Image (tube, rainbow, N blue to C red):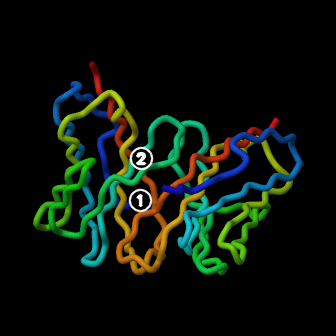
Amino acid sequence: DAKTTQPTSMDCAEGRAANLPCNHSTISGNEYVYWYRQIHSQGPQYIIHGLKNNETNEMASLIITEDRKSSTLILPHATLRDTAVYYCIVTLTQGGSEKLVFGKGTKLTVNP
Amino acid sequence: AAGVIQSPRHLIKEKRETATLKCYPIPRHDTVYWYQQGPGQDPQFLISFYEKMQSDKGSIPDRFSAQQFSDYHSELNMSSLELGDSALYFCASSSRQVANPEAFFGQGTRLTVV
């Protein structure tokens, strides 16, 4: 079962930052937070992941609260192509053996 | 960079027929995952393989089977197809040789059962 809770949908204006929250209050100490997105009927795309420190890459930033019970994915300058369903996934990744369990995700719509 | 390749991209079958979906992982990836995504649904994990051995199993019907071959490609075999099997089927691959790896997904096979 998915271990995360996300808003069903969000809207964002093009060029503005999109902040997508995720609650994972039952996360255990060795579980990571992964974010994927799925643009209409395409294969899910990896965005970013983290354990407890904030992370940043060319796509996004991931802010994890100190108690690790929630996190926020930040797309700094959203574009129309960022319209997608965003999935926050908590998983144990010991050597890549753990499957990804997709929950409901957040449908982000970026508006012109 | 090479990505996960799935074939065919589209497949139409009749009820009670069989179907075989193929997945070619990224080179040097040793783990393959299969997911099913019905219309308006989220991806559901079916099964995974590591080094040609089944490593995890999800909600995969008994009518389905899968295997990973020596070249690491994987096939999902589906028999006695039902209308409800119509879905997108995604394959993903990753490497256990990398700490905290990400899984890369293919573009999927759209199966339509009529």
x and y percent of residue B66 in the render? Answer: 73, 67
**Can you tell which quarter of the image residue A107 is in?**
top left
Mark 1 closeness class: few <14, some 14–19, many ≥20 residues within 10 Å = some
In this view, the residue in front, A27 or B99, is B99
Per the image, the residue denoted by label 1 is A2
Q: Is residue B11 left or right of A76 when viewed as pictured? A: right
User: Residue at (55%, 63%) from the top-left corner?
Assistant: B26
Residue A58 drawn at (x, y percent): 25, 50
- Depicted A19 relative to depicted A80: above or below: below
* Chain to which mark 2 belongs: A
Q: Please, which chain is the residue tagged with disc 1 on? A: A
Residue B51: which quarter of the image? bottom right
- Foreground residue among B10 and A92: B10
Is disc 2 in contact with disc 1, using a CB cutoff of under 8 Å?
yes
Kind of residue at badge 2: Lys
The earlier-in-sequence mark between 2 and 1 is 1
Vertical position of residue B24 compared to residue B30: above or below = above
Label 2 belongs to which residue? A104
* Dot 1 amino acid type: Ala
Is the residue A36 above or below the residue B51 in the image?
above
Instruction: Locate the C terminus of chain B and report the quarter of the image it occupies.
Output: top right
Residue B112 is left or right of residue B35, and the answer is right
Image coordinates of residue A60 in percent, x first then y, are 24, 48
